Image (tube, grey):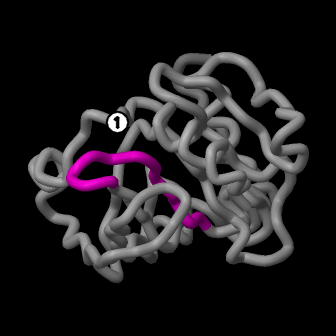
Amino acid sequence: MAGMKMRLHPLYKKFLLLAMVLGPLYWLTLTEDGQLRVDAVLLTLAGEPELNLTIEGLNGELTEAQFHQLFPDLALDCAPAATPFGDRACRVEIGLFNTLPARAFTLYLVGDRARAARVDYRPRSQGALEAQLRHRLGVTGQRDPEHPDAQTWRVADGLVLMPATRPKDPSQAALFWLSAAALSQVKERGAVAE
């Protein structure tokens, strides 16, 4: 028995080699998880900037200068903006947000203080982003009567919200953080985040 060599039938060897080649190709091209990973690798290889940020950790005391210190590689383009969330908007095109394909990050400021943030993600990332939020924030996002089409999570300073289902329109695929100050400002003005 000790000196016996195992021989595999040639057809079995071919089947194993075929499975070793086709299995990963199937996973990468035909599963959502595989496609997200391929997108992430391609965006990284293309040199697209990445933003790794726990959005629920943002607070109204964050200044633009502090954000630049935390993320020196991101070149925010800031301009005056009349929004319900602030008087200035700083935007940067990104390729990845927390390892998921994304398009842009916008930080809304009142004076020099952060009041809200928006991450425009790619609609295909909806499920994975929702899973990240559920993992970090505990429970599944609640349905808020004020925002019936959104999932919301209460955080230390405000609210995190995203669409309840994958948006058909890519411009609606956005994750928001609204500080407590922004929420009260929005309620005062009667505006609703869409």
Foreground residue among 82 and 79: 82
**Residue in the image at 76% along x and 30% along y:** 141
Residue 138 visible: yes
Residue 13 visible: no
| Relative to 174, residue 179 above or below | above
Residue beneath disc 1: 60
In this picture, residue 160 sits left or right of residue 52: right
**Amino acid at circle 1:** Gly
Foreground residue among 15 and 130: 130
**Residue in the image at 75% along x and 60% along y:** 32
Q: Which residues are magenta?
A: 110-121
Q: Residue furthest front?
A: 188
Within-10-Å neighbours for mark 1: few <14, some 14–19, many 20+ = some
Q: Is residue 113 magenta?
A: yes
| x and y, in percent, of residue 178 in the image | 53, 42
| Res 31 quadrant in image | bottom right
Quarter of the image containing the C terminus?
Answer: bottom right
| x and y, in percent, of residue 72 in the image | 12, 58
| Relative to 97, residue 90 above or below | below
| Res 155 quadrant in image | top right
Foreground residue among 65 and 70: 65
Q: Is residue 117 magenta?
A: yes
**Residue in the image at 39% along x and 71% along y:** 94
**Residue in the image at 69% along x and 41% along y:** 130
| x and y, in percent, of residue 39 in the image | 55, 71
In this picture, residue 126 sits left or right of residue 168: left
